[in-house]
Image (cartoon, coloured by chain):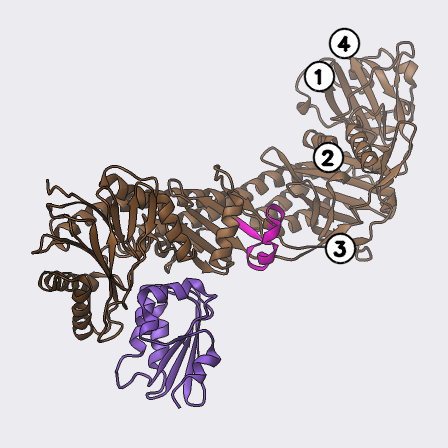
Chain colours: A purple, B brown
Amino acid sequence: MLIEVAVSSHDGYALIQVDGELDIATAPQLSEAISGVASGADLVIDLTATSFIDSSASRVLANARRADPTSPAHVSIVCPPSNRRVRRVLDFLGLPEVVPVYDDVDTAVGSLPA
Amino acid sequence: MTDELDEALARCAAEPIHVPGSVQPHGVLLAAAGAQGRVVTVSANCASLLGRGPAELAGVPLADVLRLPASDALAGDLYDVNPWTAAVASGPVDVMFHRTGDLLVAELEPADADEAPWYLTVQAAVQRLQDVRSIEDFAGVLVTEMARLTGFDRVMAYRFDPEWNGEVVAEVRRPDLEPFLGLRYPASDIPPQARALYLRNWLRLIPDVRYSPVPLLAAGDREPVEPVDLSLSVLRSVSPVHLEYLANMGVAASMSVSLVVDGALWGLVSCHHYAGPHRPSLKERAAAEFLARTASVLLSSLISRRRYDAALTSTDAARALSRSLAVPGRTVAESLMSDPTTLLDLVAAGGAAVRVGTGIRLIGETPDAADVAGILDGLWSGEDRATVATDALSRLQPSSAAWSDVASGVLAVAVPGVSGGAIAWFRPEVVREVTWGGDPTTPKLQPTPEGPRLSPRRSFAAWSQQVRETATPWQGHEVAAAEHLARMVADTLLQRREQNDRVATALQRTLLGAGLPDLPGAETAVRYLPSSHEVVGADWYDLVLLPNGHVAAVVGDVAGHGLGMSAVTAELRHALRAYLLRELDPAVALDRLNELASWLLPTELASVVVVDLDPATRRASVASAGHLPPLLITGDGARLLDVARGPALGLTDAATHPSTVVDIGPRDVLVLFTDGLVERRHVDLDQQLARLTDVAAPLRGGLDAIVEALVDGMGARDGDDDVTTLAVRRRPDGSV
């Protein structure tokens, strides 16, 4: 299963973009990318190009925002409503109630705490 | 134009080339009949060698004309006589005898008296052929030896493809001649009846393409000449179309010798001479024919040895894959795609796909999973899922041209007994430059009184064609290996299913308690299928009789798989039980469970749904922590309950879960399930939920049967995830 996790650093935040299927086999790659983000930096995880997500990967998303000294300061997720396959799974799990989910990266970045 | 072309092609294929009624002038033909073998037919040039005309030869015994030692020498096996050298009026002649119908045919050619015996010249050639290991090298040695033996300006090995187009695979030539190596010639260049003749008569010679045919005459000049079948003749006059073809190519003399493998024409050794007429002697031709016959046998064994080697390699791979399938705790796809031996070792390809159960797994270079599914479903639109092996997928499925870079060739086999189950290999596009000896797409037609006739090309200028969207063809043994693997996978799945059922039973007894408790007030049934991915899964279910007489039905799912997960599952299950008994409110119980999960299991994520059922009334209250909604089957059909949800367990440290009150009739069936029942990698979740209600709508009767029907209807066996399906029906009277 091919998956591409791209990490880029920006002014004050890091952007992780996931292209492919996030499942029990590929979730560790996302996990690694998250733990590689500098402590204290805000994090935007972009799932626009993610075609599938299972509960193992959802757990990784949820854990990204936990109060852990090495975790990023503020986490948000980008998943447009058009990516229904992923958005519906996040909705069922109730993830939007605990991690803000935005329709696009610009909105997510604009909503980061100053 | 097309009709005319078809007519001309048919006319060409119908030309009776074996009874031309004439011979070539470089020899003399005599045909004899009757017990005494008396001459009845002669070629008109008989006097040139024999000094006697047709009338003088009529009725003379052939044995006398050719000075055979005994009059009965020609009565036995002619192999013992051929070739016979006789001294006749013109000097020594070589004679070849054969029988056709009731006739005994003798063909005479002037002999060269002091030639070395042919077997000496051929011996070294045969040894060299025995030493090569590849078909390409073999063809190279063969043309070199053939040129040495016969002295032609150009000698080519010509191989037929399955459509009877020919390709020059080896060549030796006079340095000033342009190379033909690699050129292809369309099948119509050598029509079917000519190919049939080449199987019977291995060597054909035209010493001078500009010859004038010599008619066959009745020796007695009274009765009309009987048509003589010249299939086995060496002097047979050839089709004028063929002579025109050779003349157009600038060829002055030509010879071809058959190469026959497994009873079929594999190719030809084709010899051209340009300087002028060229006639290898009968003994040289006998040597050439012997060499071709020996080469055919060696070629056969070379080809079968290559097939055997390939089959051996794939047998090793098949054995390794079979061992890999037997390793517990792997999905079928993982077994077939794990190093060191994968599907791609069994059948060489750029990539492969496995579809059993819920998803498509890919290895190597392939279209993406959804496109692979589209290709497979397109190939198998009907019931019959026969093996497909194509080296040009876009010809079967024009829409697939988009993936020709990785999937020009597809070998797809169905996995028996698995709905939609398939294994497929993909080969990339191999763009080939095919160079034809002249443009094959424009045969020339010539009007004749009998109708259009095919006229051979005049231009043999190389004509290149780029062949696209094709891959290296699949070999027979590769297709067989693929089908064998599919059967092996089917067997493995069957064994695993049996094994899983046993494990599932054991799990229900230990992890989940000894089956479902028999509760007053509710009738229940459950099906728990651990994933084929890991034997011990992370779903759980529970039924709890509460102090207020209510029944709590629980289905939960912990993210992840494995033995470690089963401990987490057990903790959550027991804790929820305790909270339900103490709080009596499912929503509050979930709030408490979430606190515990966040505290004890900070890195886990779980979803769970609880239905609190009051057997005495129609009232039930549902609380969900990030779980899929329960399904309700009523007399009117089936629907998903629209219930409020709180976040999944472990998402946040403190969460408040809402509860929703629903109305459940006495005959209604409430179904709780985990995502394994519906979640499919490439199908929209909402689409799957809609399918679940469709499958459920007509279900009635016993709960066990309903649960089985749901699992089967959703195709949820052999999946990557646990599948738990729990059905509950109120039993208002409290009877057991």
Q: Give the Cα separation between the discs numbered 4 and 1.
A: 15 Å
Residue B203: give its label: 2
Question: First in sequence: mark 4 or mark 1?
Answer: 4
> What residue appears at the point 10 percent right and 55 percent down from the top-left corner?
B546
Percent position of residue B167, x then y: 70, 47
Report helix, strand or loop for mark 2: strand
Q: Which residue is mark 4?
A: B34
Nearer to us: label 1 or label 3: 3
Q: Quadrant of the N terminus of chain B?
A: top right
Q: Is residue B361 magenta?
A: no
Residue B72 occupies which quadrant of the picture?
top right
Question: Looking at this view, is B320 or B619 the one in front?
Answer: B619
Q: Give the Cα separation between the discs numbered 1 and 3.
A: 56 Å
Residue B624 occupies which quadrant of the picture?
bottom left
Q: Which residue is mark 3?
A: B464
Q: Which residue is mark 1?
A: B73
Q: Amino acid at mark 1?
A: Ala
Segment colored magenta: B394-410
Task: Output the chain of dot 2.
Answer: B
Q: Quadrant of the C terminus of chain B?
A: top left
Residue B254 occupies which quadrant of the picture?
top right
Question: Could you tell whether B732 is left or right of B375 in the image?
Answer: left
- Same subunit under labels 1 and 2? yes
> What residue appears at the point 49 percent right and 59 percent down from the top-left corner?
B368
